[in-house]
Image: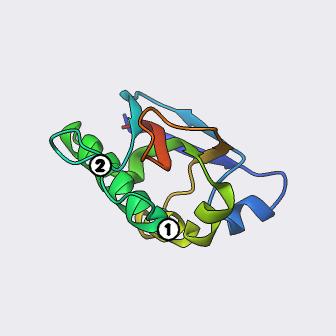
Amino acid sequence: MTIERTPVNPWPWSVQMGYNQAEAVSGETRTLYISGQTAMNADGNPQHPDDMKAQLTLSLDNLETVLDEADMTLENLIRLNVYTTDVDQLFQHYAVLASRLAAAGVAPTTTMLGVTRLALPPLMVELEATAVA
């Protein structure tokens, strides 16, 4: 059995920003809960201090690496939480995120939160996700 995803959007504005208000998922599924992915290299060292665009790009790359390890892709995302230390700066580079999701053909439910800091001081953005297959 395959999964069926049904977007729930009482208002169209969120789809224009690249996310659904909700998604109903039915069918036989395998769920992957993904820890926050940041701009860390393979050795666990923060990369790209003070460069939001580069940090967002690497965080997305790391998210895709975790998905790939679980035999999934961005197409499987149903939930994405975005944590940032600078919401205004993140919005300047939001196209990085929106274009990658659009290329995958998904608009996962999304929440963005501004936080005082992340686990390590140089980090500016963290992506936490849920995926189903």
Question: In the image, what residue occupies the spot 62% across and 46% down?
Answer: 110
Protein image colouring:
rainbow
Instruction: Give the side of residue 67 with respect to residue 107, left or right.
Output: left
Where residue 14 appears, x then y in whole percent? 74, 59
Q: How many discs appear?
A: 2
Task: Give the quarter of the figure containing the N terminus.
Answer: top left
Q: Looking at this view, is 62 or 130 the one in front? A: 62
Which label sits in the foreground, 2 or 1? 2
Instruction: Give the side of residue 58 with respect to residue 87, left or right.
Output: left
Task: Give the quarter of the figure containing the C terminus.
Answer: top left
Q: Quadrant of residue 47?
A: bottom left
> Of the residues shown, which amino acid type is indicated by label 1?
Ala
Q: Quadrant of residue 2?
A: top left
- Residue extending furthest toward the right: 11
> Of the residues shown, which amino acid type is indicated by label 2?
Asn
Could you say whether the residue bearing mark 2 is in a helix, strand or loop? helix
Instruction: Give the side of residue 6 with respect to residue 99, left or right.
Output: right
Q: Do the numbered discs 2 and 1 sit on residues whose CB atoms are within 8 Å?
A: no
Question: In the image, what residue occupies the spot 43% across and 65% down?
Answer: 51
Q: Which residue is mark 1?
A: 102
Spatial CA distance of label 2 from label 1 is 18 Å
Could you say whether the residue bearing mark 1 is in a helix, strand or loop? helix
* Image: 13 above or below 87: below
Q: Which label belongs to residue 58?
A: none
Question: In the image, what residue occupies the spot 36% across and 28% down?
Answer: 30
Where residue 83 appears, x then y in whole percent? 57, 43
Q: Which label belongs to residue 62?
A: 2
Q: Residues within 10 Å of mark 2 (few under 14, many from 20)?
A: many
Where residue 75 appears, x then y in whole percent? 40, 53
Question: In the image, what residue occupies the spot 56% across and 38% down?
Answer: 117
Q: Residues within 10 Å of mark 1 (few under 14, many from 20)?
A: some
